[in-house]
Amino acid sequence: MSQEHRAAIKDAERRERATWFRSLPVQQQAAVLRRAEIFRSGLPACWSWPASVPTETDYRRMQRARLEAEGYADDVLERLWELECTVPFDDDAALSLWQNGRCAVCEDVGFELVTDHDHVSGLVRGLLCRSCNTLEATNGGEDSVFGRYRSRPPTQILGLEMRYWDPFARELAPDRRNETPRDPWDDALQL
């Protein structure tokens, strides 16, 4: 492929991205630019958040405000509040409250967050949007935003230690730090 042909392809790709970007609502354009800036900086968004662990009082206050915002009648609200108070405040709740619906890497909000964990230690690292969780698994350079995230994730910032609950195996993820690494090809040879 010639240099001119490559330049033409890159130019077409740039125009296509610009057209796509202009088609987004202003709020989404701002989110795309913010995410690009975070990736360029190489620093996870959570590193800029205050490093104080939310208290149970903070958690209860936020839960009460959420219930009140849903517009229930007073008697229903009080019953829901009684039920809500039976839910224990634990490290999961503290992490969720601290992240406040934000992805720990890109700070996007409004997307379902997934629990990211270390597959060797079995410990939770933080909550990520699906996009960052997928990218985190494949972009492992220490100097990348994901490498830095792994070196100091939200649970470490807050001093929390939580074992990952595997929803597929329906059990806590095992700690494999002291195990001898397995060669995945050994299993294939036994077929």
Image (spheres, grey):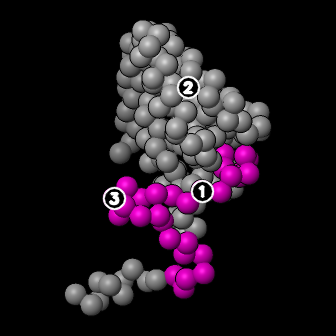
Extent of the magenta region:
152-181
Q: Could you tell me the amino acid type at mark 1? A: Met
Point 42% across, 9% down: residue: 73
Label 3 neighbour load within 10 Å: few <14, some 14-19, many 20+: few
Label 1 neighbour load within 10 Å: few <14, some 14-19, many 20+: some
- Which residue does the numbered mark 2 point to in the structure image? 63
Q: Secondary structure at mark 1?
A: loop
- Which residue does the numbered mark 1 point to in the structure image? 162
Image-based side of 149 in relation to 166, left or right: right
Point 54% across, 75% down: residue: 176
Answer whether labels 3 and 2 touch (C-beta < 8 Å): no
Asked if residue 185 lies in the magenta stretch, the reply is no
The image quadrant of residue 141 is bottom right
Image-based side of 145 in relation to 134, left or right: right
The image quadrant of residue 60 is top right
User: Cα distance, mark 3 to mark 2?
Assistant: 29 Å
Q: Could you tell me the amino acid type at mark 2? A: Gln
- Which residue does the numbered mark 3 point to in the structure image? 168
Which is more N-terminal, label 1 or label 3? Answer: 1
